[in-house]
Image: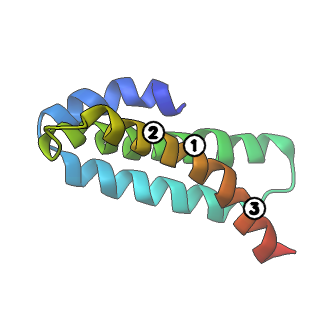
Amino acid sequence: MLLTVGSISGPIYDRGYLRILLIIGTFGVVFGHMMLSLCHEYWQVLLAQGFTVGIGAGCLFVPSVAILPTYFSTRLGLAVGVAAAGSSFGGVIYPIVLFRLYV
């Protein structure tokens, strides 16, 4: 969902609606995790984690990588690599933190 929504949020970012994307993305990720705590069946987990968090993350990830060329003229590749690796690292660390909170 992250990259699928990224193909939609990219042109929206290009039109200048970064703030709206950040608001929708942040709300989607937080709301998806809140609804994940209420799930009792598999389809609910798929809806909360897969779709809601995926759409929210797609609205956050693409503009976060696309905004880097406006701030970095040298070492742009390194900046994009750190930003992309940071999202993957967050995807590994974030569930561990949630697990520690609920156990």
Can you identify the residue that label 1 sits on? Answer: 88
Q: Of helix, strand and loop, which one carries label 2?
A: helix
Residue at image location 79% in from the left, 40% down from the top: 43
Identify which amino acid the numbered label 2 is placed on.
Ala
Q: What amino acid is found at the position of numbered circle 1 in the picture?
A: Ser
What's the distance in space between the residues labelled 3 and 2, CA to CA? 20 Å
Q: Residue at x 87, y 75 (%)?
A: 103
Which image quadrant for residue 75? Answer: top left
- Is residue 73 among what the camera can see? yes
Q: Which circle's residue, 1 or 3, is located before the other in the chain? A: 1
- Dot 3, crowdedness within 10 Å: few (<14), some or many (≥20)? few
Are the residues flagged by discs 1 and 2 in contact, CB closer than 8 Å?
A: yes
Measuring 49% from the left and 48% from the top, which residue is drawn there?
A: 86
Q: How is the image coloured?
A: rainbow
Identify residue for label 3. 96
Left or right for 7, reference 52? left
Secondary structure, mark 3, is helix
Report whether 13 appears left or right of 85.
Answer: left
Residue 96's spot in the image, x, y percent? 75, 61
Q: Judge by depth and name the residue closer to the eye, 36 or 13.
A: 13
For label 1, the SS is helix
Amino acid under disc 3: Ile
Please give the name of the residue rendered at 12% of the width and 34% of the height, measured from the top-left corner: 15
Disc on the earlier residue, 3 or 2? 2
Residue on which the image places disc 2: 84
Residue 65's x, y, as percent? 32, 39
